[in-house]
Image (spheres, rainbow, N blue to C red):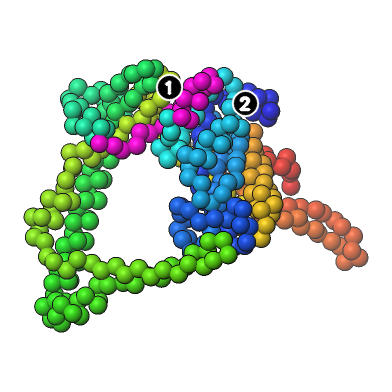
Amino acid sequence: EVCRRFCWGLGGMYVDWTTLIVFGRARELAQRGHRKDHRGDKPQVKVGVAITGRHSIPFFYSVEDGSVPDVTQFQSDYRHLKERLPPGSLLVYDKGGSCSLTEQRIRDSGHHYLTAVKNSRSLRICYQNLVRKKMKIVHTYKNKQSVSCQIEEKDGIYRYHFYDERRASHALKKRERKLEKLQKEQNKQLQTIKNKGITHAKKKFTKKMHNTLEYGDRIIHSEVTVQKRLYAKTNEQLQEEQMADRELDGFFTLKSSRKLTPKKALRKYRQKDRAEKMFSALKSVHNIRPFQVWTTNEIHGAALVCMLAALYVSLIQALHDLTDHTQKTITNQIRKLTLGVKQALDGTILKLFYNNLTPQLHTILSITT
């Protein structure tokens, strides 16, 4: 309602999901699954958000079981989202939420989507058949490297095949770093075998991992032994393995049910990092992570409070045109604001004044010195 009142467009929506660890026993939600939070030793919950495209205002959020994949959560989220969006809205999300069933539902309900295409054998064959010289340049970086595109349309779905020279150069450097690392590891193994023998090398390059998993009322303990291969490969073999499919580096594909120019499709998809920035603000500014609660209702309550705080700061940014200031900057300025009191010897208050009053707080809180 606020967005409609101030004529803020809801035609574009960025959707994303993340995992948050839980210190507690909320068994209905706190489950083990794919970790995005780098804490495989703790149960987690999945949080999804949808933010407006123009002012990055939280429009919708959901909290699900920690074992639910992104594609399944998106199906549930869209059932609640579709009734609140104006006709013809464009949803932008990454390929983790891509699913043909959900995409068909989006089209059937009168909306559109823009997402990345998952890597597959057929897609790699398509890249091999593309003629780079015939691809149209849609963007040029400051270092003169460019992004070119070729459009393909089938059954009302537009595919944008991009080749990014900067992305290709970064991928090549990554391959070279990995090749150098493998060569160093192999030389280290050969030196160990030469100096101390194969038996010592087997012990040194073997790791044992112990895992504990709770399943209902039972606890499962497992032990896994991992040993590196000790046979040596030539530098030519290592280089051939690491440089395989090098000619496909730099290619990626976007698909959309709405016809967009390649430049606009690329720009909109890259702007989906606004949802990632919202997650960063929720974690670092509003302290949504970790959930130090013990029941499912407490998890929902903590998520609601943090989302309301993020919504409040986002509205401040939009209403006062402070989009160039991060949520962390604004909240830190509010926290540092204090009220000073000047008193006479008899206790009479002579003056009230504010400390740490910035120009942004003048605008936000409409206060003066």
Residue 197 to residue 32: above or below: below
Q: Quadrant of residue 109?
A: top right
Q: Amino acid at mark 2?
A: Glu
- Whether the residues at callouts 2 and 1 have beta carbons within 8 Å, the answer is no
The percent position of residue 309, horizontal first and vertical second, equals 66, 46
The percent position of residue 244, horizontal first and vertical second, equals 16, 45
- Which residue shows up at 36% across the image and 30% down it? 254
Q: Quadrant of residue 27?
A: bottom right
Residue 118 covered by magenta stretch: yes
**According to the image, label 2 marks what residue?**
83
Give the camera-side residue of 25 and 260: 25
Element class at badge 2: loop
Residue 117 to residue 329: above or below: above
- Which residue shows up at 25% across the image and 36% down it? 121
Q: Amino acid at mark 1?
A: Ser
Q: Earlier in the sequence, mark 2 or mark 1?
A: 2
Element class at badge 1: loop
Give the camera-side residue of 271 and 151: 151
Whether residue 140 appears in this view of the structure is no
Whether residue 330 appears in this view of the structure is yes
Give the magenta range. Answer: 101-121
**According to the image, label 1 marks what residue?**
257
The percent position of residue 235, horizontal first and vertical second, equals 10, 58
Spatial distance from mark 2 to mark 1, Cα to Cα? 19 Å
Give the camera-side residue of 138 and 293: 293
The percent position of residue 77, horizontal first and vertical second, equals 57, 36
Q: Quadrant of the N terminus?
A: top right
Is residue 306 found left or right of 51 in the rendered image?
A: right
- Which residue shows up at 39% across the image and 17% down it? 156
